[in-house]
Image (spheres, rainbow, N blue to C red):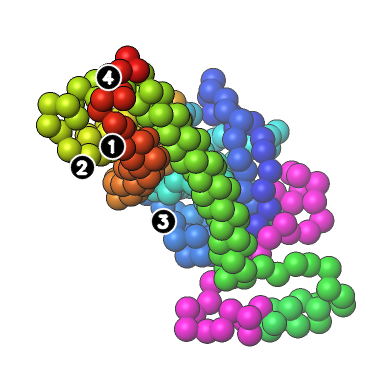
Amino acid sequence: MVQGNAAVEAGGSSRRTMVFGAGPGVPAIWSMRPAIGRFLPDDAGGARPFAVLGATLRAELFGSKSPLGARIRVGSEPFRVIGVMARKGQMLGFDLDDSVFIPVQRALAMFDRDSLMEIDLLYDRAADSSAVAERVRQLLIRRHGREDFTITTQDQMLEVLGSVLDVLTAVVAALGAISLLVGGIGILTIMTIAVRERRAEIGLLRALGADRRQVLVLLLLEALLLALLGGLLGLIVGAGGAWLIGQLVPALPTRTAWDFVLLAEASAATIGLLAGVLPALQAARLDPIAALHDE
């Protein structure tokens, strides 16, 4: 495979898009299939100017009309359209629907390259990827005379991706822990101030017959309510932000994981209860006569 970027023209329409110089095995390797027409044939060579369009590029240049047999220009070279690929979406950050496929030899000349950028291999899933990679390495060394290439297996790609996700998870967890700590301190402060300002009410409750346990439960419920309201506000901001990003960038998959939402609300409730214990104990231990006298 060779890839680059060039303007594709058809009639009076033009669009700058990704150009893939590819061999005939791409549909099998990338799990793609032509929607109409065919893909680049085995005998594409370097002399036959064939092109296969992605679904988005076809819609932009030809609308609902069939482009088969149409003449287009890729860069400054003429090509004949022989197929349109079914929608595939993105792969490793590249939009395969907004692209054009041409014979690899023509792409080498178009982008002034003397070698391929990438060779993708499909192997039996029961095989050992490291053993396959070693056999490929030995074969290429025999052909090139030296190791002037890099081999990356899918397992290695997944391992790197897993490492990145682990780092992101740790960062998000650290931010979440800081947020919970700040929220807990905020609830503790609010409840402490509330107890001090409501000494008379607490003293009156005790004087009317409320025992310490009832006062304790009442204050803990208030702390729990504050935590749940904060969690609800965070849910609204988070889910609303995810929805807004999905509307602004439809290609970016966003969703709200409701199992994590429930876990977050449970965590908020737990932090609220823990932060409210000390102020609630202080309120429960108030002497009703002293509280009313101080007021």
Query: Alpha-carbon distance for marks 3 and 1?
Result: 72 Å
Q: Which mark is residue 103?
A: none
Q: Which residues are magenta?
A: 107-133
Please tell me whether mark 3 or mark 2 is closer to you in this view. Answer: 2
- Which residue is situated farthest in the top direction here? 295
Q: Amino acid at mark 3?
A: Arg
Query: Alpha-carbon distance for marks 1 and 2?
Result: 7 Å
| In-front residue for pair 174/241 | 174
Q: Is residue 263 above or below residue 155?
A: above
> Is 67 on the left or on the right of 257, as rendered?
right
Query: Alpha-carbon distance for marks 4 and 2?
Result: 19 Å
Q: Which mark is residue 284?
A: 1
x, y percent for residue 42: 56, 64
Disc 4 designates what residue?
292
Disc 2 designates what residue?
213
Of mark 4 and mark 3, the one earlier in the sequence is 3
Q: Amino acid at mark 2?
A: Arg
x, y percent for residue 265: 32, 42
Of mark 4 and mark 2, the one earlier in the sequence is 2
Labelled pair 1, 2 in contact (Cβ < 8 Å): yes
Please tell me whether mark 4 or mark 3 is closer to you in this view. Answer: 4
Disc 3 designates what residue?
33
> Is 69 on the left or on the right of 113, as rendered?
left
What residue appears at the point 12 percent right and 26 percent down from the top-left corner? 208
x, y percent for residue 240: 36, 28
What residue appears at the point 44 percent right and 26 percent down from the top-left corner? 248
Looking at the figure, which quarter contains the N terminus?
bottom right
